[in-house]
Image (tube, rainbow, N blue to C red):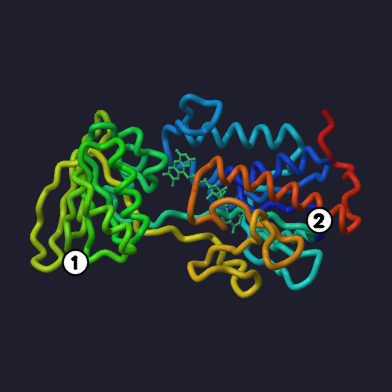
C-alpha cells in the first residue's frame, strides 16, 4: 500500500481534533484527520451540553456531527481508522493505521483525548448521561437542589464535591478507605462545608434508578470491612476516580508527566519534538472541557502553520478549500 504524504495530520476527532483540522484546512494546508475508535470523542457519550457557546442546549453527539460537517465543508479529509503506531524519530513523521495505510506527515496534531475511569458497573453504564456523570463542571448545573454522591478520594473528587455544593442540596462523598488522598487545604475546605457528608469505607455496588424516565434514584453501598449492603437515596452520581490520557502510542517518544499526559511548552501546544503539537484532554488534566479542547486545537493548527512556514513547507496544497 502506497504511503500518503500530508502537511498536517490530526489524530483524533473530538473538539480539539476537529478545531485543529478546520483551522488547518482554512489555511490551505489540506489536513487529514484520523477519527479513531470513538468518532466525535467523549461528547458522544453524553446527552445535554449547556456550556458550548452559541447553543443554549445541544446534544453532545449532535454537536460532534456538526463539527464533522464543518470540517468536511472546509475540505478536511476525514479517515475512519485508528492509529496503531507512530514513529517520531525523524521528520517527516510516520503514522501507521490499523488498515495498514501509512501517512508521512510534516506536522502532527495529537488530539487523542482522555477517558474517564469508571467504576465498571453495568448499572453505571445504564445511567451514564442520565444521572451518572464523570464531570461536575459539565453536569452539576442539572442537579440544582438535588442530592448527589461523588465517588473518589483524591483532589479531583474533593473539588468535584465542593463544586457541586453550588447547586445540590446535599453532597455525599463516598470513599473506599478511611482517609482521603486529597491535599490538606482541599480536605479542610471539604470538612468545613455543611452540605457535604463523608461516607467512609464504602464502595458503590450498584446504581439504582427508573426506566421511565431514565434516571437515578439511589445507590447500593457495600461496607468495605463488613461487606454489609445499605441503600443511599441520591438523584445523581459523579464518578471522580481519575482519567487516562490516550498517550500509549507516544510513550518513550514524547515528554509526558507522571500521569501520562503530554507535556507542552508554556502558552503553546508544542511538544518535546519540533513539529508535533498536542491539544485538548491529552495534555490537559485541569480544565477538561470541550471549549478548552477546541481552543487548544486552534492553537495547535496555528502553531503547525507557523512551523511549516518556518521550515519552508507551507505552500498551499492542491487539495484545499475551494469555496
Ligand atoms: C460524560 C461526559 C460529559 C461531558 N460533558 C461536557 C460538557 O457538558 N461540556 C464540556 O465542555 N465538556 C464536557 N465533557 C468533557 C469533554 O467531552 C472533553 O473535555 C472533550 O471532549 C475533550 O476533547 P478532545 O478533543 O481533547 O478529546 P476527546 O473528546 O477525548 O476525543 C479524543 C479523540 O481521539 C481519538 N483517538 C484516541 N486514540 C486514537 C488513536 N489511536 N487513533 C486515532 N484516534 C484516536 C478518539 O477516537 C476521539 O475521537 C464531558 C465528558 C464526558 C466524558
Q: Toward the viewer: 184 or 258?
A: 184
Q: Based on the displayed image, in which of its 4 quarters is residue 68 positioned? A: top right
Q: Which residue is mark 2?
A: 307
Residue 106 in the image, given as x and y percentages of width and height: 80, 59
Q: Residues within 10 Å of mark 1 (few under 14, many from 20)?
A: few
Q: Quadrant of the N terminus?
A: bottom right
Q: Which residue is mark 1?
A: 178
Disc 1 Cβ-to-ligand 1 distance below 8 Å: no
Q: Based on the displayed image, in which of its 4 quarters is residue 90 positioned? A: bottom right
Q: Residue furthest bottom?
A: 252
Horizontal side of residue 26 vs 130, given as left or right: right
User: Tags 2 and 1 in contact by the CB under 8 Å rule?
Assistant: no
Q: Toward the viewer: 166 or 293?
A: 166
The residue that appears at 49% across and 41% down in the rendered structure is: 43
Residue 291 in the image, given as x and y percentages of width and height: 55, 40
Q: Secondary structure at mark 2?
A: helix
The residue that appears at 91% across and 56% down in the rendered structure is: 312
Amino acid at each position: 500500500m502506497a504511503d500518503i504524504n500530508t502537511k498536517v495530520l490530526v489524530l483524533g476527532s473530538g473538539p480539539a481534533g476537529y478545531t485543529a483540522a478546520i483551522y488547518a484546512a482554512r489555511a490551505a494546508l489540506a489536513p487529514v484527520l484520523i477519527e479513531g475508535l470513538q468518532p466525535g470523542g467523549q461528547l458522544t457519550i453524553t446527552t445535554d451540553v449547556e456550556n458550548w457557546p452559541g447553543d443554549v442546549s445541544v446534544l453532545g453527539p449532535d454537536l460532534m456531527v456538526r463539527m464533522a460537517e464543518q470540517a468536511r465543508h472546509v475540505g478536511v479529509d476525514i479517515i475512519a481508522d485508528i492509529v496503531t503506531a507512530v514513529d517520531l524519530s525523524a521528520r517527516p513523521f510516520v503514522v501507521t493505521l490499523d488498515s495498514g495505510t501509512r501517512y508521512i506527515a510534516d506536522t502532527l496534531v495529537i488530539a487523542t483525548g482522555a477517558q474517564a475511569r469508571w467504576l465498571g458497573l453495568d448499572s453505571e453504564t445504564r445511567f451514564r448521561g442520565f444521572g451518572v456523570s464523570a464531570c461536575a463542571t459539565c453536569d452539576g448545573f442539572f442537579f440544582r437542589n438535588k442530592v448527589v454522591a461523588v465517588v473518589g478520594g483524591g483532589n479531583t473528587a474533593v473539588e468535584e464535591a465542593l463544586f457541586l455544593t453550588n447547586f445540590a442540596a446535599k453532597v455525599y462523598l463516598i470513599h473506599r478507605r478511611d482517609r482521603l488522598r486529597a491535599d490538606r487545604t482541599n480536605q479542610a475546605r471539604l470538612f468545613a462545608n455543611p452540605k457535604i457528608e463523608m461516607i467512609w469505607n464504602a464502595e458503590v455496588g450498584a446504581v439504582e434508578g427508573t426506566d421511565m424516565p431514565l434516571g437515578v434514584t439511589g445507590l447500593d453501598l457495600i461496607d468495605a470491612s463488613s461487606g454489609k449492603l445499605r441503600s443511599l437515596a441520591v438523584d445523581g452520581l459523579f464518578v471522580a476516580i481519575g482519567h487516562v490520557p490516550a498517550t500509549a502510542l507516544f510513550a518513550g517518544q514524547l515528554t509526558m508527566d507522571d500521569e501520562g499526559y503530554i507535556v507542552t511548552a508554556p502558552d503553546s501546544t508544542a511538544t518535546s519534538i519540533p513539529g508535533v503539537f498536542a491539544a485538548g484532554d491529552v495534555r490537559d488534566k485541569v480544565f477538561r472541557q470541550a471549549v478548552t479542547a477546541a481552543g487548544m486545537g486552534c492553537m495547535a493548527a496555528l502553531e503547525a502553520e507557523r512551523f511549516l512556514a518556518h521550515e519552508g513547507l507551507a505552500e498551499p496544497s492542491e487539495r484545499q478549500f475551494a469555496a
